[in-house]
């Protein structure tokens, strides 16, 4: 009541003031804290009301709240909920379970903030889960089906649920526990491995954060094991020797079937035991064989489990009696001179397997298996036989037969007559592949007359009605041929096919042909190979012989006749050959640098055939050609004599001889000491405009800055040529200019290779200079006309008795012409032999 008086006195005071005519009091809003509602585990709704906004409108309203402070303020949790007069609320979530919260409503205007009464609420606590359980179902000897439902998780997740069982009341999870998932909802489990004939107590259970709760308790009792229940069912598929026994296990008695089967015998209390597979099938059977026909059998089904053996009712069946087999037959087909095709079908085996079936024949009616018998397998179904080795022009009677244990049965009787033998029928074919001296004769055996052919072939000759026999093998097919060779060309021949059997000989119509007139052989001339200065490989190809044998073939050639014949030079390859054919041979004794005309040829009875003309030129004899226009050649074989025949011999000064580039004896190359050694000879008047020099060099100088003359005809008169190694370790070919002023120099690109043999070849054609090193073009330059001729002495190893060369020189040659490319290649690897 004290609190209410405190609340209402200000209100009364405000009402009194409102009736006065003085100014409104300047007050904050009036606010009430209302009780919390909708309280749960983590949620609640707190409520308030602004009953009077006071001096001015309430610009903010809401709640202050605290979990720990019984007198909450804005320094705790402040929750704004709009503005103005009236009721207001705030829904809270994420609260703590089972926790006490303090709260008060507040409202604010321009004059300040006022608070309602401080109230509190406590969130709900967790509960145990609520669950139900149904009556146990499908109770067997060792199993039961249990079903439960978690209807309420109690505010927190059920982390495990299931069933617990025991042989005493009030089972808990410490007894037999069967876990079945988590959460709310229905769940079911088939409990196995129980004991038979036992009483169990069962409850559903659920575990949440609050603990374990149990559903209603139920009790049940597992079934008591017993012998299986077995039913004997009627036998099926009863035959003369076979039957199928049938049984059905309607109840296994609560335990596994260890054995099942049948008892069978010819007595009413059968004892013959037949055990069948103990698979899961409750219906089972067994196929009997090798029974006695027309016999009564008794049988009953049995089954055994751990309790014992049960037997079904004793039933019986009687096997069928045998009958003779039933057959049908077709009309005989494909009747020939000595054979016929017979067909039949065993439509019914009479209840017993047909052990033999076939046909029987005789030349009189009603044939039996004691006459001609042709077996054809056993069993039911269609069968067919081609009977052979019959007599021609003979009447036969036949029946199909079948044998089973009941006896022999026969089909309908038929009769037929074999054909009569006759002479063969033969046709003369057309001549094939007619050539100048060959042909293929053809014939056709239309009918052998029903008996073996003893002879066949052709009658052949150059006159009508020929009589010469050409036999072919009797194993040849009906269409037969014979190939003839070595005939005469352009000749008419006659031929007829014939064939003979035991009835006689038949001859076909006469035919004829004329052998072809031969043509010239078709010859080709082959391309040449391995051309040298005096040899070549040449040959021919013969595509065909023109229809007449080749009697001679080869090539013919000439160096003067552009269309050579065998009356020029002829090279005979052979006398006989079978085209297509080709041959190449080496032709020797030719002249170098000469053009030859060549044709292949072949001779048959028509005459000589030639291939097309082909030409080639023999190579230059470089060992001879390099001697042409040679001015001087110094091989330095122990002396400095000129071997060219021009007698331009040299005089030696301080020269020694040493090994050459091939390692020959120490008298095979000149050695220069680089200071006093040189060779000097006469001038070279034969050098006028063109020039070639070959010189083998082994330079022993390894440092630059000096000059070394290899060979020169230059002197103070500013004429001639000079070949030297220069200060840059390169080879320099120099010519005096025509005006007598200075020289023109051409250098190699690569530097000299010290202590290594190199061949330097220089040519000058009156306009262009070319320098070759080891057979490869090093440099080339157009320099125009120069003063090549000189009256100065030839010097080797020194220039003006200065610029001495240091190293070895060998095989120096000088020409008054430009060497050819092939000569340059030759001299890059060879010496000149005189």
Image: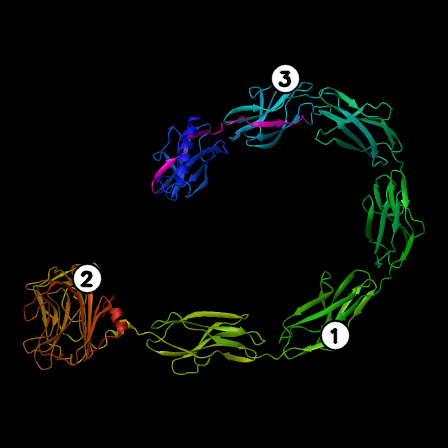
Q: What is the residue that sits farthest to the right in this orientation?
A: 365
Residue 499 vertical placement versus 787 (above, below): above
- For image coordinates 42% across by 28% down, the residue present is 3
Q: Where in the figure is residue 790, as x and y percent of width and height?
A: 11, 79
**Viewed as shown, does residue 722 lie left or right of 439?**
left
- Which residue in the structure is indicated by mark 3? 167
The residue tagged with tag 2: helix, strand or loop?
Answer: strand
Q: Quadrant location of the C terminus?
A: bottom left
Residue 96 vertical placement versus 324 (above, below): above
Nearer mark to the viewer, of 3 and 2: 3
| Front residue of this view, candidates 177 and 771 | 177
Q: Is residue 302 in sight in this rendering?
A: no
Disc 1 to disc 3, how far (Cα)?
A: 122 Å
Disc 3 to disc 2, how far (Cα)?
A: 117 Å
- Which residue in the structure is indicated by mark 1? 466
The residue tagged with tag 1: helix, strand or loop?
Answer: loop
Q: Earlier in the sequence, mark 1 or mark 3?
A: 3
Discs 3, 2 touching: Cβ within 8 Å = no
Magenta part of the chain: 109-136
Q: Earlier in the sequence, mark 3 or mark 2?
A: 3
Bin the neighbour count of mark 3 within 10 Å (Cα to Cα): few under 14, some 14-19, many 20 and up: some
Q: Where in the figure is residue 753, as x and y percent of width and height?
A: 17, 61
Residue 567 vertical placement versus 499 (above, below): below
Where on the picture, by quarter, is residue 120? Answer: top left
- Which residue in the structure is indicated by mark 2? 757
Where on the picture, by quarter, is residue 30? Answer: top left
Magenta segment includes 117: yes
Q: Quadrant location of the N terminus?
A: top left
Magenta segment includes 65: no
**Viewed as shown, does residue 504 lie left or right of 514?**
right
Q: Earlier in the sequence, mark 2 or mark 1?
A: 1
């Amino acid at each position: 009541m004290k609190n209410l008086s405190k609340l209402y006195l200000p209100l009364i005071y405000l009402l009194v003031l409102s009736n006065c005519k003085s100014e409104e009091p300047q007050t904050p809003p009036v606010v009430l804290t209302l009780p919390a509602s909708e309280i749960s585990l983590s949620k609640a709704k707190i409520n308030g009301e602004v009953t009077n906004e006071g001096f001015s409108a309430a610009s903010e309203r809401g709640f202050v709240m605290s979990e720990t402070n019984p007198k909450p303020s804005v320094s705790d949790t402040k929750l704004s909920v709009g503005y103005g007069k009236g009721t207001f609320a705030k829904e809270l979530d994420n609260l703590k379970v089972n926790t006490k919260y303090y709260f008060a409503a507040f409202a604010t205007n321009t004059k300040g903030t006022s608070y309602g009464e401080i109230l509190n609420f406590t969130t709900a606590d967790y509960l145990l889960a609520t669950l139900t359980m149904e009556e146990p179902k499908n109770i067997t000897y060792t199993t039961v089906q249990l079903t439960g439902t978690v209807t309420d998780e109690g505010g927190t997740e059920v982390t495990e649920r299931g069933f617990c069982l025991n042989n005493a009341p009030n089972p808990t999870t410490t007894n037999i526990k069967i876990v079945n998932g988590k959460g709310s909802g229905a769940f079911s489990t088939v409990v196995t491995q129980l004991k038979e004939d036992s009483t169990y107590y069962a409850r559903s259970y659920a575990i949440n954060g609050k603990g374990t709760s149990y559903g209603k308790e139920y009790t049940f009792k597992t079934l008591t094991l017993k012998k299986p229940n077995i039913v004997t069912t009627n036998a099926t598929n009863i035959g003369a020797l076979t039957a199928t026994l049938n049984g059905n296990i309607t109840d296994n008695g609560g335990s596994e079937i260890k054995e099942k089967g049948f008892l069978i015998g010819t007595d009413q209390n059968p004892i013959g035991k037949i055990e069948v597979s103990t698979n899961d099938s409750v219906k089972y059977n067994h196929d009997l064989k090798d029974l006695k026909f027309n016999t009564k059998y008794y049988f009953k089904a049995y089954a055994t489990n751990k309790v014992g053996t049960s037997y079904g009712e004793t039933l019986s069946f009687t096997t069928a009696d045998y009958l003779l087999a039933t057959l049908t037959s077709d009309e005989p087909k494909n009747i020939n001179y000595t054979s016929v095709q017979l067909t039949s079908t065993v439509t019914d085996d009479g209840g017993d397997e047909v052990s033999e079936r076939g046909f029987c024949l005789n030349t009189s009616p009603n044939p039996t298996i004691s006459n001609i018998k042709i077996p054809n397998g056993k069993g039911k179904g269609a069968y067919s036989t081609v009977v052979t080795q019959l007599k021609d022009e003979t009447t036969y009677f036949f029946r199909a037969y079948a044998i089973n244990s009941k006896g022999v049965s026969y089909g309908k009787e038929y009769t037929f007559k074999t054909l009569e033998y006759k002479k063969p029928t033969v046709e003369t074919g057309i001549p094939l592949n007619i050539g100048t001296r060959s042909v293929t004769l053809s014939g056709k055996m239309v009918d052998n007359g029903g008996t073996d052919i003893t002879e066949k072939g052709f009658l052949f000759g150059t006159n009508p009605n020929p009589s010469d026999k050409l036999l072919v093998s009797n194993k040849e097919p009906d269409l037969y041929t014979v190939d003839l060779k070595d005939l005469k060309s352009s000749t008419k021949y006659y031929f007829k096919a014939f064939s003979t059997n035991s009835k006689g000989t038949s001859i076909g119509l006469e035919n004829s042909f004329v052998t072809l007139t031969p043509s010239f052989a078709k010859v080709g001339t082959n391309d040449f190979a391995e051309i040298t200065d005096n040899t070549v490989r040449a040959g021919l190809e013969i595509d065909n012989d023109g229809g007449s044998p080749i009697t001679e073939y080869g090539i013919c050639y000439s160096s003067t006749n552009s269309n050579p014949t065998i009356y020029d030079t002829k090279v005979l390859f052979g006398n006989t050959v079978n085209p297509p054919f080709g041959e190449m041979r080496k032709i020797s004794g030719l002249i170098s640098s000469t053009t030859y005309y060549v044709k292949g040829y072949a001779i048959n009875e028509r005459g000589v055939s030639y291939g097309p003309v082909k030409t080639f030129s023999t190579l230059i004899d470089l060992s001879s050609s390099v001697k042409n226009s040679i001015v001087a050649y110094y091989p330095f074989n122990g002396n400095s004599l000129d071997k060219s025949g021009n007698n331009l011999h040299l005089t030696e000064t301080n020269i020694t001889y040493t090994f050459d580039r091939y390692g020959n004896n120490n008298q095979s190359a000149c050695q220069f000491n680089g200071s006093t050694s040189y060779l000097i000879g006469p001038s070279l008047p034969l050098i006028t405009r063109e020039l070639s020099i070959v010189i083998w060099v082994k330079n022993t100088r390894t440092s630059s800055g000096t000059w070394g003359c290899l060979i020169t005809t230059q002197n103070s008169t500013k004429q001639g040529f000079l070949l030297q190694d220069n200060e840059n370790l390169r080879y320099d070919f120099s010519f005096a200019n025509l005006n007598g002023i200075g020289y023109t120099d051409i250098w190699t690109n690569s530097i000299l290779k010290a202590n290594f043999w190199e061949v330097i070849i220089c040519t000058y054609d009156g306009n262009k200079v070319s320098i070759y090193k080891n057979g490869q073009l090093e440099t080339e330059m157009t320099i125009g006309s120069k003063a090549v001729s000189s009256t100065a002495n030839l010097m080797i190893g020194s220039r003006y008795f200065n610029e001495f060369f240091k190293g070895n020189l060998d095989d120096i040659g000088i020409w008054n012409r430009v060497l050819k490319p092939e000569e340059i290649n030759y001299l890059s690897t060879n010496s000149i032999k005189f």
